[in-house]
Amino acid sequence: MDDPTPSEPRDLARYARQMRYPPIGVAGQRQLSAARVLLVGCGALGCVLASTLARAGVGLLRVVDRDFLELNNLQRQVLYDERDVASGLPKAILARQHLQQINSGITVEAHVTDVDHRTVGPLAADVDLIVDGTDNFEIRYLLNDVSLDRQIPWIYGGCLGAVGQTLTVVPGETPCFRCLYREPPPPGTTETCDTAGILAPIINVIASLQACEAIKLLTGNRQALCRDLQIFDLWENRVRQINLDALRDHQRCPACGAREFEWLSGARGSQSAVLCGRNAVQLSYPGGTAISLEALAARLRGLGQVLHNPYLVRLEVADCRITVFPDGRAIVQGTEDIAEAKTLYARYIGA
């Protein structure tokens, strides 16, 4: 039966089965209802994370994603459907719509923006936890910096092919992401979604582990957190847990040791990025003025096919597609050459 027992308040009745798990109970559910989570990225990992945390009753989900939806995303991004692709709306907006239908009793914020050293501070200002739903090394170093600087736990997750891994970082208690990966891999030296592909089941496994770690932390069950790097290879049927205590050397780690937050300060990190598996480049122009999407759409009509909604303008012309957001960011599809992407932007959008 799903009706609440006398010990399960009616306002929490939808979580009855979750509350009957002894480590959570009514008190833990109350903590979840008061919790605030920043979810960075609402693609493959982010979809599973957002849905699971919303269904678990996390009080506020702040969903941040810089991208829009494409048909080839649906193979693994389980929050969306073909109608969402046709809408042309950004992922964060679509995610909010679906999450509010899943659980109308929580607050869902949607932010269509790039997470960088300028925006990450306000986004993380009042949260209890940061969860990684990205596919980007630079953003992970940035999340690690803001986590350590503000003493906010964060949960890393990454997948490629049929392999995925996850790590929970609790500042002052566990090794940090930079203890594990001292420097990002040089461009072109690692596999990408384009070269290795991605299987949907590994996404669900890793995101579910991240969500479970989030629930442990937010309900006060820190003793149950996994302090190891967990690695799953679903194709080769292998599971590994690597104890990282030996890496927690404050004298050696620039981040949790020397507290040098190079990504958070803006000293490191690029403003343009090739997007994994997209044949596309994102261009960012810090310090630029806000763009009038309506005026831009009017100017572009006649050059090619134009899609305009309150969140973006998209121009399809020749062999490229250029999507422009109100903050001045653009995603140029049809090339992975940053210089060519800048040329196309300048040709059709302007300097």
Image (cartoon, rainbow, N blue to C red):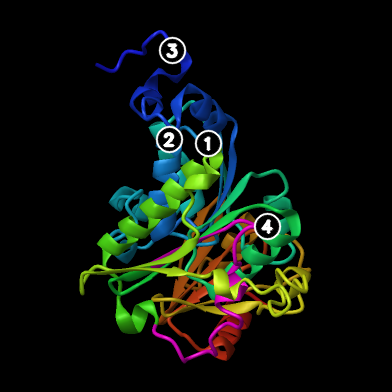
> In 3D space, how far apart are the residues under numbered discs 4 and 1 (Cα atoms)?
44 Å
| Picture disc at residue 219 | 1
Q: Nearer the viewer, residue 203 or 218?
A: 218
Q: Earlier in the sequence, mark 2 or mark 1?
A: 2
Secondary structure beneath dot 1 equals loop
Nearest the eye: 278 or 161: 161
Question: What amino acid is labelled 2 in the image?
Answer: Ala
**Residue 76 drawn at (x, y percent):** 30, 60
Q: Could you tell me residue 158's position as x and y percent? A: 43, 67
Q: Please identify, in this view, whether the residue under mark 4 or under mark 3 is nearer the observer.
A: 3
**Sequence-first tag of 3 and 2:** 3
Tell me which residue sits at (36%, 11%) in the image: 5
Is any atom of residue 94 visible in this view? no
Q: Is disc 2 surrounded by few (<14), some (14 to 19) or many (20+) residues within 10 Å?
A: some
Q: CA distance from mark 4 to mark 3?
A: 54 Å
Q: Nearer the viewer, residue 282 or 20?
A: 20
In primary-sequence order, the first of circles 4 and 1 is 1
Q: Residue 269, position in %: x, y?
A: 67, 78
Check the picture and name the quadrant holding the N terminus: top left
Please tell me which residue lies in front, 191 or 279.
191
Q: Which one is earlier in the sequence, the residue at label 3 or at label 1? A: 3
CA separation, marks 4 and 2? 39 Å
Q: Secondary structure at mark 2?
A: helix
The amino acid at mark 4 is Ser
Q: Tell me where the magenta segment starts and ends, as one range.
A: 165-191
- The residue to which callout 4 is attached is 292
Q: Which residue is mark 3?
A: 7
The image shows residue 310 at horizontal and vertical percentages of: 56, 49
Left or right of residue 285, residue 111 in this image? left
Q: Please tell me the numbered disc located at residue 56.
A: 2
